[in-house]
Image (cartoon, grey):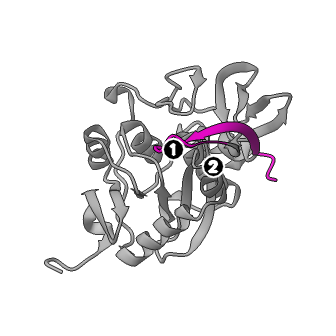
Amino acid sequence: MDDRIVKRDIMKIFNDGTVKKIDDEMIVEKRMTLEIDGIVEAVVILTPEEEELWALGNLYSRRMIESLSDIKYLKIENGRIIIEIANKRDGWAQESRFLHTACGALLQEEEKRAPSSLPIEWKISFEAIMSGIDWIAEAPLFKQTGSVHVAALLTPQGERLFRTEDVGRHNALDKAIGWLLKNNIRTRDVVVITSGRLPEDMVLKGEGARIPLMASISAATADGTDAARRCNMTLIGFARSGRFNVYSAPERIKYNIGG
């Protein structure tokens, strides 16, 4: 069995009064401390494995690093992610030192954030987006336990690049961004497909990483939509059952008006 999954004895109760004892497969959580330049910056709860990708993606989405060359040292040991940064940048600070599985750690006052506008450099088809939605539904941990979020990366042509799972939707996105950094792929050349809802903090993380398009099977919030419009990100929600909603920057979608 995958070591990220354990079995626990539980009771299943049915509406006819039947009770069954079963072995249920459940996801494991792992607590890690993030240390940057000798300072404990945060504690995160995530799904084990890909901790390095999470750390890289977290730093990149906060604009604390621009490439792997900004990392002098990265080591994972004894529940700690230890990082030394070679080229120090101001970046965006964490809002909270404890990053739980539903953390909105990037929310800050708008005037403290550098303005950005993501350029429109390509278009993607309806079919490519829905293929990505199908792909996240096939993620193995999600199918086994139902208790993780999925983040997947596609090219604008629909090529499947990478898929990851985590108990936190922010963590899953960080891991996906970290994978791009490690593989030297420009974030502006990819699409993010996610299972989680799209509130402001998720959009800000995507903006920080310079992701031009984020799509989800779930909903966007009003503040998430406003944030996407400010940075010219294409935001898509409720991508399911042969349709989706486009909340901002529809110019990146191939579509026929009235079609």
Rendered image: mark on residue 145: 2
Q: Position of residue 257 (x, y in %)?
A: 16, 77
Q: Position of residue 156 (x, y in %)?
A: 46, 72
Look at label 1 and name its amino acid: Phe
* 237 sits to left or right of 140: left
- Which of these two is toward me, 40 or 186? 40
Tell me which residue sits at (47%, 45%) in the image: 16
- In the rendered image, the vertical position of residue 27 relative to residue 140, given as above or below: above
Residue segment shown in magenta: 1-20
Q: Residue furthest right?
A: 77
Q: Quadrant of residue 128?
A: bottom left
Tell me which residue sits at (59%, 21%) in the image: 98
Tell me which residue sits at (59%, 20%) in the image: 97
Residue indicated by mark 1: 14
Q: CA distance from mark 2 to mark 1?
A: 19 Å
Task: Decide: few, some or many residues near mark 2? Use Cα within 10 Å; few <14, some 14-19, many ≥20.
Answer: some
Q: Nearer the viewer, mark 2 or mark 1?
A: 1
Q: Position of residue 154 (x, y in %)?
A: 53, 67
- Which of these two is toward me, 50 or 109? 50
> What kind of element bears circle 1?
loop
Task: Decide: few, some or many residues near mark 1? Use Cα within 10 Å; few <14, some 14-19, many ≥20.
Answer: few
Q: Is residue 11 magenta?
A: yes
Q: Quadrant of the C terminus?
A: bottom left
Q: Determine if residue 79 is in view.
A: yes
Tell me which residue sits at (50%, 30%) in the image: 103
Look at label 2 and name its amino acid: Thr
- In the rendered image, the vertical position of residue 189 relative to residue 158, given as above or below: above
Q: Determine if residue 125 is in view.
A: no
